[in-house]
Amino acid sequence: MKDDSIRSQAPGRRSAAKYVLLDAALVVVIGAVFAFAANRVSPRGLALTRNYFPAGTGRLVSATPPAAGLHNAAGTNSLPVDPTQLLAAELKEKGLQLVDGTQAVQLFHDPRFKQNTVVFVDARDEQHYREGHIPGAYEFDPYRPEKYFDTVLPVCQAAEQIVVYCNGGDCDDSETAAILLRDVGIPGPKLLVYGGGITEWTTNGLPVEIGGRNSGDVRKPGK
Amino acid sequence: MNTGQPNTKRIALNLSAVLVRWLLGAAFLYTGLSKALHPVDFLKLLRQYDLVQSYWLLNSIAAALPWFEIFCGLLLLAGIAVRGAALTLTAMLVPFTVLVFHRALAIQSALGIAFCAVKFDCGCGTGVEFICHKLLENFLLILMLGWLLAGHGRQFSLRFDLIKSKSR
């Protein structure tokens, strides 16, 4: 009796499974249409045809050694190798040059900085830029380049040296930005990637500018 | 005298299933929104898995996945096509958990540390997490989705099955 009842339930289960699969198919189709439409409408949506990573695959190591043992600023585990050397070699392959904190500070105090022939380019997003950037640095989010090209390109064309930075650590947005600038015609030897980024800059107690470029609101970290 | 007991148990079970449905719906809505609000960050995290070589395919996944999660989260909250949404989410979550596991293994072997000491942002919308915690979390999510898939959580649902079986 029990076997008969199980057997009689089997076709019902198969049919129920079929309906669940049909439901799932509908969810996938309607969900996909919704998802692509939402991405299209969203002001933060991605451009599907843009290559956001002209530098190729991502970097797994930090540009600066982690401050406390295994973990870097982002909290992710870091590799036990000399990351600066690796990064310098990686950048060299792409025709770019790595600069450390001392060189970045020297360039910041270089008289050419005031004449705009040495420029700093901040490759982070708008929110982070406004929270604090190297004073006088130009905003250039490499994932929204069309927003910044009009301002940044003429400046970079006129400059002798361009220091590009992002957060430092695992962040490779400075590299992405430098490659993007190189690809639109800025000569590679002019482009310097400051690997330590804003994290190293503020850790060393150097000033940051809050808000827009030349807002005048320059503060020392923690003040 | 005991006739009320099975009834109470059934009601408690039904309510638990509804709570699980709402919990899952809220969880997917939250993780989807956190990715959809920062799509570039999600794209960068997705890149670490080396899933696809073509950049437009990677862009498409990063653009659609967060909104798709939001869509499925809303369906679960409202109780629409619950089993279809649960099946779709399971079909996404299982392979993604395998990918996260493989990525953690790669980090573990590169660093020579204990597996559970590995922590990274897997792009799940919950930030940097220890891998064992993440895997347990995903396992629980899959179990809860399986429960809904079995047909529980019908109460307070607008249309539990989108296409209704004729036998019902």
Image (cartoon, coloured by chain):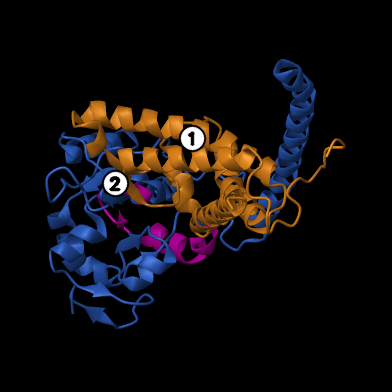
Is there a contact, CB below 8 Å, between mark 2 and mark 1? no
Outermost residue, front side: B1
Closest to the observer: A216 or B18?
B18
Q: Secondary structure at mark 1?
A: helix
Q: Which residue is mark 2?
A: A170
Q: Quadrant of the C terminus of chain A?
A: bottom left
Q: Amino acid at mark 1?
A: Phe
Please name the residue shown 83% across and 38% down the image: B165
Query: With B33 as the anchor, is A86 left or right in this view?
Result: left
Does residue A119 belong to the magenta stretch?
no
Is residue A148 positioned above or below B16 on the image?
A: below
Closest to the observer: B30 or B163?
B163
Q: Quadrant of residue A49?
A: top right
Provide the residue span drawn in magenta: A145-173
- The x, y position of residue A41, in whole percent, is 67, 60
Q: Which residue is mark 1?
A: B96
- Mark yes or no: residue A40 visible: no
The chain shown in orange is which? B
Chain A drawing hue: blue
- The x, y position of residue B141, in whole percent, is 49, 43
Q: Amino acid at mark 2?
A: Asp
